[in-house]
């Protein structure tokens, strides 16, 4: 049914994997999936959160040694929730054991309900300037195809599938523009984005090289391996290229999505408006854009200083003048009366020894 409705093939594949995994757990636990309740779903979540990591001893980050990431947990629960929605529609169940977070405006806390697994919002990782220069230095040793792909991935903030699905008809070298077709995007929104002159030089070199492989129109990036010669480049090949560069640069967190985060963050640093960045990235809402932008504490401090500098100066300029400092009260000792406090006491003078503001 989901395939007939036109969902992306990779979405269908991910739903199938998640549903098969849940049904396998129910089979091992001896639970009928139709009769499962929230307690069984909680055990399923606990198993996903405690299973050994796929990479074993090669831990990429501190929190990836065991269990699935928070986003993967959310993705695994989607097909399970859809399964029970389908069973409710067929009249086989009355309720869905997989909670769905929702919020009703105007009812305050009474109108909100948390999902089964809380969502964690983390800042995307981007390399520092020195780390990025090291990545570019290693990329110089790559074939011209990989260099062009890395340059376009950053210039146009392309996702992995958008990059690998580019066709020769999507290029406009005269104006250095690139068309990202709607069917290749995550949000099904077509957009046209520019690329830099440096990337244009690399692209021209690659087009000459591509002509030696195939002169036929179609996919822009072709495989040059003996097994898949002249066939379209797959997503996994590009992932392996980026992974190889990440290992050589000792940057385990570098991924095919890092260039997109870095590009959008650089646009925010240059002062682009949030809506303009969202249109450039192909986001439906600015909330998605905020998730892809990583502004460090120093960047925010600089923006705050620039934005509040004129306000601070205006307040200082229009603030009331400070009163002239009061002349401190002189004691007997300051006045040169011999004997100081004794002279004042003997003469009947009252000396206030409390400090004056």
Image (cartoon, grey):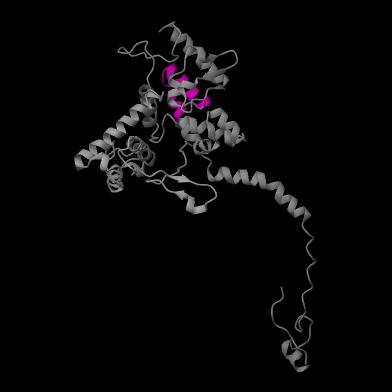
At a point 49% along the width and 38% down the height, the residue shown is: 291
Task: Quarter of the image for the C terminus: give it.
Answer: bottom right
Please tell me which residue lies in front, 23 or 277: 23
Q: As drawn, is 323 to the left or to the right of 117?
A: right
Tell me, yes or no, if residue 133 can be seen here: no
Task: Quarter of the image for the N terminus: give it.
Answer: top left
The vertical placement of 81 against 178, above or below, is below
- x and y percentages locating residue 281 in the rendered image: 53, 29
- x and y percentages locating residue 171 in the rendered image: 53, 14
In the figure, residue 138 lies in which quadrant?
top left
Q: As drawn, is 335 to the left or to the right of 267?
A: right
Give the magenta range.
135-156
Task: Please check the rendered image and state whether residue 137 is part of the magenta-colored stretch, yes or no.
Answer: yes
Q: Looking at the magenta stretch, what is its main secondary structure? A: helix
Task: Please check the rendered image and state whether residue 76 is part of the magenta-colored stretch, yes or no.
Answer: no
What count of labels does the image hold?
Answer: 0
The vertical placement of 98 against 233, above or below, is below
In the figure, residue 319 lies in which quadrant?
bottom right
Please tell me which residue lies in front, 24 or 342: 24
- x and y percentages locating residue 178 in the rendered image: 54, 19
At a point 37% along the width and 14% down the height, the residue shown is: 223
Tell me, yes or no, if residue 26 can be seen here: yes
- x and y percentages locating residue 70 in the rendered image: 38, 42
Determine the residue located farthest toward the front in the rendered image: 91
């Amino acid at each position: 049914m989901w395939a007939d409705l036109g969902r992306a093939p990779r979405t269908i594949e991910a739903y199938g994997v998640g549903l098969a995994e849940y049904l396998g757990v129910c089979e091992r636990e001896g639970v009928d999936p139709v009769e499962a309740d929230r307690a069984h779903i909680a055990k399923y979540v606990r198993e996903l959160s405690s299973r050994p990591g796929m990479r074993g001893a090669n831990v990429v980050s501190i929190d990836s040694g065991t269990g699935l990431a928070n986003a993967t947990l959310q993705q695994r629960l989607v097909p399970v929730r859809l399964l029970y929605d389908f069973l409710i529609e067929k009249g086989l169940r009355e309720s869905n054991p997989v909670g769905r977070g929702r919020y009703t405006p105007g009812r305050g806390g009474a109108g909100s309900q948390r999902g089964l697994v809380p969502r964690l919002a983390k800042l995307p990782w981007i390399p520092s300037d020195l780390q990025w220069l090291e990545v570019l230095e290693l990329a110089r040793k790559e074939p011209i195809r990989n260099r062009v792909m890395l340059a376009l991935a950053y210039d146009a903030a392309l996702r992995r599938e958008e990059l690998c699905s580019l066709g020769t008809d999507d290029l406009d070298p005269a104006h250095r523009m690139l068309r990202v077709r709607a069917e290749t995007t995550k949000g099904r929104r077509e957009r046209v984005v520019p690329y830099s002159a440096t990337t244009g030089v690399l692209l021209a070199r690659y087009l000459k090289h591509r002509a030696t492989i195939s002169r036929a129109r179609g996919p822009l990036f072709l495989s040059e391996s003996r097994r898949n010669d002249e066939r379209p480049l797959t997503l996994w090949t590009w992932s392996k290229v980026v992974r190889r560069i990440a290992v050589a640069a000792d940057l385990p967190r570098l991924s095919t999505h890092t260039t997109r985060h870095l590009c959008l963050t650089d646009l925010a640093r240059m002062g682009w408006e949030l809506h303009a960045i969202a249109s450039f990235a192909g986001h439906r809402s600015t909330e998605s854009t905020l998730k892809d932008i990583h502004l460090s504490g120093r960047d925010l401090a600089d923006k705050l200083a620039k934005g509040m500098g004129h306000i601070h100066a205006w307040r200082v300029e229009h603030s009331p003048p400070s009163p002239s400092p009061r002349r401190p009260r002189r004691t007997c000792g300051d006045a040169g009366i011999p004997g100081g406090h004794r002279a004042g006491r003997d003469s009947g003078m009252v000396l206030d020894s409390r400090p004056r503001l």
